[in-house]
C-alpha cells in the first residue's frame, strides 16, 4: 500500500479567518492526503506537539493576523528542537512579498499568497515531503 | 400589478420567443451553457412581468420610508443626506491611530470606525503570552482606559459618531468610550455610534469569540437594556453578514444566516424581559458588497423586506423603527486580488455603486492594497474618493431606489428573500441559530459554498481578472504599510507603568464586585464601567469573566 | 534503525513514526511489534463510541483531564472511519482537545480509514499496542458508532463507553441492533437538554432485557462541555475495570479480543494473498465480469482460487 501523505493544517495566531485553511484542508483531502485539522488560535508549541504525535510529513500554516514573522519561524525552531526538521513547513495567507525572503531564510519552505490555486500547493507538498 | 390577461398574452409571447431562440442557439450557442450570478444562482436571458406576476406593489415594495421598506428606510434617502462615509481604521498604538482619525476627519470622513488588534478583540492584554507578535497588527491595541483616552484625544465625542468593531468584549470597550466621554464632559445620552457586538457570527465565521454562547447572549442583552436607558442614541449591535460572506457564503446565505442571528438576539432580549420596541430600533445590520452589482442590490432590498415582515409578524413590533432594517456596508475584502492591485479600485467602485443603489446607511470602501497588507494613507484616500465620486458625480443619489421596477431586480429580490427564508425555516427547525451553529450546520453550508466557488475559480469557470486570466509578470508591490514591531514592547511598558501607578486596591475591589455580578443575574454593564474607571485592564476584566463563564469551544465540520 | 530503542526510552516521535509504519504495513515495523509484544498489556484500553454529534471528543478531552489529575498518563486514538473515495480524509478531533496538545503526559493520534483491506480495526489495534509499549496508563479509542467497522474498533477494548445524547430517540432504535450491547458504561451527554431523562430511561429499558448478566452497565448523566458529571463517569469506568479485574473476566475479555483479532488478521492475510495471486484485482475483475455474464459461476471461481493456495 502506498504511503499516504499526512498534513497538519493549523492556524497560528489569533485571527479567526479560517476560510483559506478550510479550503486547503478540503483540497488536500481531495488530492488523497490525510489532513489533521486543529482549528484556531494554535500556539507554535501546540502545533509542533501535534505534528510530532501525528507524525505528519508537512505542517501547513494559515495566518492572516500579521504575526507571521514571529510565529512561523517559531514553529520551525521548535521542530528543530524536537529533531523533526524533516517535516516540511509551509505557510499561506495575507503575507507581504517583502517578508517572504525572511521567512524562507528562517526555514519556512514556501509561502502561498492569496490567489494561489490549491493545485500549486498540492504539487509543492507532493514534490517536497521527505520520502 | 399586471392583469391576468396581460400576463397570459405575455406568457404566450415569451414562450414563442423562447422556442425561436432555442432553435437559433442550436447553430449559434451563447458564450456559456449556463449563466449564473456571482453567487452561482441561475440567471435567465431576460425577465418580464411574468417573473413577478404575483407581486403586489404596496405589500411587497411600498413607498420609500414605508413598510416593508423594500425601497429604503428613509423617504428622502440620499436627497436628504449622503450615507455616512465611514472608513475602518486603526493600527499600532492609540497615539498613531488618533493621528489617522484626525486625518480622516480632515479629509471629509463623517464617522470614525475603530479597528482593534486581535488581543484586544479576544480580551487579552498586550503582555499576555498569546499576544506575542499580534499587538497593534490588525488594529489598535487598547489595554485600558488610558489607551482609550489617547485614542480619542482632541476628538469631541458629542460631535462624531463612532463605530467600533468589537464583539466578545464589546461591553468593556463601550464602557471605556463612555468613560472617555465623561472626562470630556459629554454625557452618555449624547453619544452616537455602533458596537458590532455580534457574537453569533464570530462563532460562524470571524473567530474572535471568548465566552460560550449563553453568557455571551446575556452580555449582549445586558448592553441592550443598559443602552436603552443610558445611551439611547447608540446602535447596540451590528448584526453582521459581512464576515459570513467573506467566509464564502452566497448572497442568499448572507441574508438568511444574518437574519437568523438577528432573530436569536431579539428572542434572547424578549426572554430577558425587554419589550421589543425598546431595543429593536437600535438594532443595525452590516452587509458585504460584492461585484455582481444587480444581485447585491436585490440582496439588500430582500433583507429589508424580510426583516420588516419578521419584526412585525413574528415579534409583533409596533414601532416602525423596529421594522426598518438599517445597515452598514463594507466592500468585499475577499474579492480583492493580490495580483495587479490597481484593478481593485475598479472592483471597489462597482461595489460602492451596489451598496448605494441598495440603500446603505453607511459605507466603508476597501483600499486596493488590502489583499497584501494594511492600507496606506494614499490608498485609503482613493477608497474614500471612490465614495465621494459616486455620491457627487454619478447621479444615482438623486432618486430613491432607482432600480425598483426592473423585472430582473424585483424577481431577484423575491428569489433571494425566498431562499433566505428557507434557511431561516431550517434553522428554526433545528432550534434557532445558536443551536445550528453549535451543530456546525451553518458553518458547513458556508464551507460547501466556499469550496464550490474555489473549484470554479481553479477550473476558470469563474474568471477573476488578473488572477486566473489576463495575468502579467509583476514586481513585488512597494511601499506597503508596516506596523512598527516595537509596538508590542511599547504597550508592555505602558502596562507595567499603569499597573504600578494606579490604585490597585480600587481595581481589585471593582473586579471582585464584577465577578459577583457575573455569577448572579444583575446587569453587568454598570460594574464593568466602574472597573474601567479604576483603570482595570481589558485583560483583567475579561479574565474575571473567563473565570465565571468559561470559554467557547469551536465547532468544526469539514 | 534504533526506533525500537527510542520507543522503549519513551520517545514520542519514535512511537508516532512506528504507528505510521504499521499503518503502512511496514514489515520491519511489524517485526518490532512482534518482539515487543510481551511488553504490552499494561495500559487499560477504553473504547468510546456513539452517534455523530454526541460530543465524544469533548468528553474524551474532559475524561483525559480528570485522569491527568490522578497523575495517570493517557493516549487517545481518534478514529474517523468516514473518508471519501480519494483515500484522503480530514481528521478534526484534535480541535476539541487543543489544551491537551502540549501536555507531556498525553499522546493524541488521529487515524483515518484509508480504505484498509482489513478494515481500520487492524491499524487501530497496532496503534494501541505501540502506545501501550510506549508506557501510557490509559488509552482511549474514540470513534463514531454508526456501523460494523466502528463496532469492531471498540470491541478490542477492556471497557467500552457508549455516549448518547437527548433528542436522538429514533437513533437509539437504529443503533441498538448490534451496537448497544457492546456498551459497558453509558453516558448521556448534553444532559442539560430537554429529553435527557427520557433518553436515560430508554437506555435503561434496553439494558433490562439483559438482566441476568453479571455486570449491569450504569447510565451516567454528563454535560461534557461544562465538565459536569465527569468525575462520576470516571468512577463508573473504574468500577467496571475493578469488576473485570476482580475475576477472570478480564483475561477472558482479552482472550476474546485476541481471538477476534487473530480471526481478522487471518481473514485479511488470506484476502491479501488471494488478491496478490490474482494479480491485484485484475484477474478478479475479469472473473467477476464472466460471472456477471453467466459464463461461469462464483463457486467455481472460489474453488479455483482457493485451490491454488494449497490451504
Image (tube, grey):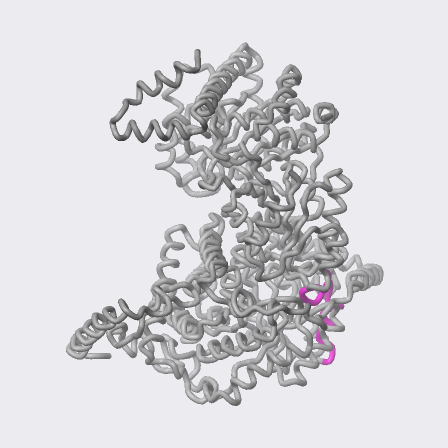
Residue C238 falls inside the magenta stretch: no
Q: Is residue C229 left or right of residue B305?
A: right
Q: Position of residue B387 (x, y in %)?
A: 55, 82
Q: Which residue appears at 49% of the width and 20% of the height?
A: C269
User: To which quarter of the image does residue A50 belong?
Assistant: top right
Can residue B130 be seen in the rendering of this structure? yes
* Main SS, magenta residues: loop
Q: Is residue B314 left or right of residue C89?
A: left
Q: Is residue B453 left or right of residue B467?
A: left
Q: Position of residue B154 (x, y in %)?
A: 73, 80
Residue B150 falls inside the magenta stretch: yes
Magenta stretch? B135-154
Q: Is residue B73 left or right of residue C32?
A: left
As rendered, which of B224 and A80 lies closer to the eye? A80
In this picture, is A56 found above or below B33? Answer: above
Q: Position of residue A45 (x, y in %)?
A: 71, 44
Q: Quadrant of the N terminus of chain C?
A: top right
Amino acid at each position: 500500500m502506498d504511503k499516504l501523505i499526512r498534513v497538519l493544517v493549523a492556524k497560528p495566531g489569533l485571527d479567526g479567518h479560517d476560510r483559506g485553511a478550510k479550503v486547503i484542508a478540503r483540497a488536500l483531502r481531495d488530492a488523497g492526503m490525510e489532513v489533521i485539522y486543529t482549528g484556531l488560535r494554535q500556539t507554535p508549541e501546540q502545533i509542533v506537539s501535534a505534528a510530532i504525535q501525528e507524525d505528519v510529513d508537512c505542517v501547513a500554516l494559515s495566518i492572516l493576523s500579521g504575526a507571521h514573522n514571529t510565529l512561523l519561524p517559531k514553529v520551525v525552531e521548535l521542530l528543530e528542537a524536537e529533531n523533526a526538521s524533516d517535516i516540511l513547513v509551509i505557510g499561506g495567507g495575507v503575507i507581504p512579498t517583502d517578508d517572504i525572503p525572511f521567512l524562507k531564510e528562517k526555514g519556512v519552505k514556501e509561502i502561498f499568497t492569496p490567489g494561489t490555486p490549491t493545485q500549486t500547493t498540492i504539487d509543492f507538498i507532493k514534490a517536497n515531503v521527505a520520502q | 400589478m399586471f392583469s391576468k390577461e396581460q400576463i397570459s398574452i405575455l406568457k404566450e409571447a415569451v414562450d414563442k420567443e423562447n422556442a425561436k431562440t432555442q432553435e437559433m442557439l442550436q447553430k449559434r450557442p451563447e458564450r456559456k451553457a449556463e449563466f449564473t450570478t456571482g453567487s452561482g444562482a441561475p440567471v435567465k436571458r431576460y425577465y418580464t412581468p411574468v417573473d413577478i406576476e404575483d407581486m403586489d406593489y404596496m405589500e411587497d415594495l411600498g413607498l420609500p420610508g414605508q413598510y416593508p421598506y423594500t425601497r429604503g428606510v428613509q423617504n428622502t434617502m440620499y436627497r436628504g443626506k449622503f450615507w455616512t462615509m465611514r472608513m475602518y481604521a486603526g493600527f499600532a498604538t492609540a497615539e498613531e491611530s488618533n493621528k489617522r482619525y484626525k486625518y480622516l476627519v480632515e479629509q471629509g470622513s463623517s464617522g470614525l470606525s475603530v479597528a482593534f488588534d486581535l488581543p484586544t478583540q479576544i480580551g487579552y492584554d498586550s503582555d499576555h503570552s498569546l499576544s506575542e507578535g499580534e499587538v497593534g497588527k490588525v488594529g489598535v491595541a487598547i489595554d485600558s482606559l488610558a489607551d482609550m483616552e489617547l485614542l480619542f484625544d482632541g476628538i469631541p465625542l458629542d460631535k462624531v459618531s463612532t463605530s467600533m468593531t468589537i464583539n466578545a468584549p464589546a461591553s468593556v470597550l463601550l464602557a471605556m468610550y463612555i468613560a472617555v466621554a465623561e472626562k470630556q464632559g459629554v454625557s452618555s445620552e449624547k453619544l452616537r455610534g455602533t458596537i458590532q457586538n455580534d457574537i453569533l457570527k464570530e462563532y460562524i465565521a470571524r473567530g474572535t469569540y471568548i465566552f460560550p454562547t449563553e453568557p455571551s447572549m446575556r452580555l449582549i442583552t445586558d448592553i441592550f437594556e443598559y443602552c436603552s436607558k443610558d445611551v439611547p442614541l447608540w446602535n447596540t449591535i451590528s448584526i453582521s453578514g459581512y464576515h459570513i460572506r467573506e467566509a464564502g457564503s452566497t448572497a442568499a446565505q448572507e441574508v438568511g444566516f444574518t437574519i437568523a442571528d438577528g432573530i436569536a438576539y431579539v428572542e434572547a432580549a424578549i426572554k430577558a424581559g425587554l419589550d421589543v420596541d425598546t431595543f429593536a430600533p437600535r438594532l443595525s445590520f452590516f452587509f458585504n458588497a460584492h461585484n455582481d452589482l444587480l444581485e447585491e442590490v436585490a440582496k439588500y432590498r430582500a433583507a429589508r423586506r424580510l426583516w420588516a415582515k419578521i419584526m412585525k409578524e413574528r415579534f409583533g413590533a409596533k414601532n416602525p423603527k423596529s421594522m426598518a432594517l438599517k445597515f452598514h456596508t463594507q466592500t468585499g475584502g475577499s474579492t480583492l486580488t493580490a495580483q495587479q492591485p490597481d484593478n481593485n479600485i475598479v472592483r471597489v467602485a462597482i461595489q460602492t455603486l451596489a451598496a448605494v443603489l441598495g440603500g446603505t446607511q453607511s459605507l466603508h470602501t476597501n483600499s486596493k492594497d488590502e489583499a497584501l497588507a494594511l492600507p496606506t494613507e494614499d490608498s485609503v484616500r482613493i477608497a474614500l474618493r471612490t465614495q465621494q465620486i459616486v455620491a457627487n458625480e454619478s447621479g444615482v443619489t438623486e432618486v430613491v431606489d432607482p432600480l425598483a421596477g426592473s423585472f430582473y431586480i424585483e424577481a431577484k429580490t423575491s428569489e433571494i428573500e425566498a431562499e433566505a427564508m428557507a434557511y431561516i425555516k431550517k434553522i428554526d427547525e433545528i432550534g434557532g441559530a445558536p443551536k445550528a451553529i453549535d451543530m456546525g450546520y451553518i458553518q458547513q453550508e458556508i464551507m460547501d459554498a466556499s469550496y464550490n466557488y474555489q473549484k470554479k475559480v481553479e477550473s476558470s469557470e469563474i474568471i477573476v481578472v488578473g488572477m486566473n486570466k489576463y495575468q502579467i509578470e509583476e514586481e513585488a508591490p512597494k511601499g506597503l504599510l508596516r506596523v512598527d514591531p516595537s509596538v508590542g514592547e511599547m504597550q508592555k511598558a505602558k502596562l507595567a507603568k499603569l499597573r504600578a501607578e494606579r490604585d490597585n486596591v480600587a481595581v481589585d475591589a471593582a473586579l471582585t464586585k464584577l465577578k459577583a455580578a457575573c455569577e448572579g443575574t444583575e446587569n453587568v454593564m454598570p460594574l464593568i464601567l466602574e472597573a474601567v474607571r479604576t483603570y482595570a485592564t481589558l485583560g483583567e476584566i475579561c479574565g474575571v469573566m473567563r473565570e465565571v463563564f468559561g470559554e467557547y469551544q469551536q465547532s468544526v465540520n469539514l | 534503525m534504533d526506533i525500537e530503542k527510542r520507543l522503549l526510552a519513551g520517545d514520542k516521535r519514535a512511537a508516532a513514526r512506528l504507528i505510521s509504519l504499521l499503518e503502512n504495513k511496514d514489515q520491519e515495523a511489524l517485526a518490532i511489534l512482534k518482539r515487543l509484544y510481551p511488553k504490552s498489556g499494561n495500559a487499560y484500553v477504553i473504547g468510546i463510541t456513539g452517534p455523530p454529534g454526541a460530543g465524544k471528543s469533548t468528553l474524551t478531552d474532559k475524561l483525559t483531564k480528570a485522569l491527568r489529575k490522578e497523575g495517570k498518563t493517557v493516549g487517545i486514538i481518534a478514529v474517523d472511519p468516514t473518508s471519501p473515495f480519494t483515500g484522503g480524509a480530514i481528521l478534526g478531533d484534535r480541535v476539541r482537545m487543543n489544551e491537551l496538545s502540549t501536555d507531556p503526559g498525553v499522546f493524541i493520534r488521529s487515524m483515518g480509514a484509508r480504505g484498509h483491506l482489513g478494515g481500520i480495526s487492524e491499524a487501530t489495534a497496532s496503534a494501541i499496542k505501540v502506545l501501550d509499549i510506549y508506557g501510557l496508563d490509559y488509552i482511549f479509542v474514540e470513534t463514531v458508532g454508526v456501523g460494523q467497522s466502528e463496532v469492531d474498533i471498540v470491541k478490542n477494548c477492556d471497557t467500552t463507553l457508549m455516549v448518547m445524547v437527548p433528542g436522538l430517540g429514533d437513533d437509539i432504535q437504529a443503533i441498538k441492533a448490534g451496537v448497544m450491547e457492546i456498551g459497558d458504561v453509558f453516558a448521556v451527554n448534553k444532559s442539560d437538554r430537554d429529553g435527557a431523562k427520557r433518553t436515560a430511561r430508554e437506555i435503561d429499558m434496553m439494558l433490562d432485557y439483559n438482566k441476568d448478566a453479571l455486570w449491569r452497565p450504569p447510565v451516567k448523566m454528563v454535560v461534557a462541555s461544562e465538565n459536569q458529571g465527569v468525575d462520576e463517569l470516571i468512577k463508573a469506568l473504574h468500577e467496571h475495570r475493578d469488576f473485570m479485574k476482580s475475576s477472570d473476566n478480564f483475561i477472558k475479555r482479552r482472550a476474546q479480543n485476541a481471538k477476534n483479532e487473530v480471526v481478522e488478521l487471518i481473514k485479511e492475510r488470506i484476502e491479501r494473498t488471494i488478491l496478490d495471486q490474482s494479480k491485484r484485482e485484475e484477474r478478479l475483475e475479469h472473473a467477476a465480469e464472466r460471472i456477471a455474464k453467466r459464463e461461469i459461476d462464483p463457486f467455481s471461481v472460489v474453488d479455483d482460487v482457493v485451490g491454488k493456495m494449497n490451504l
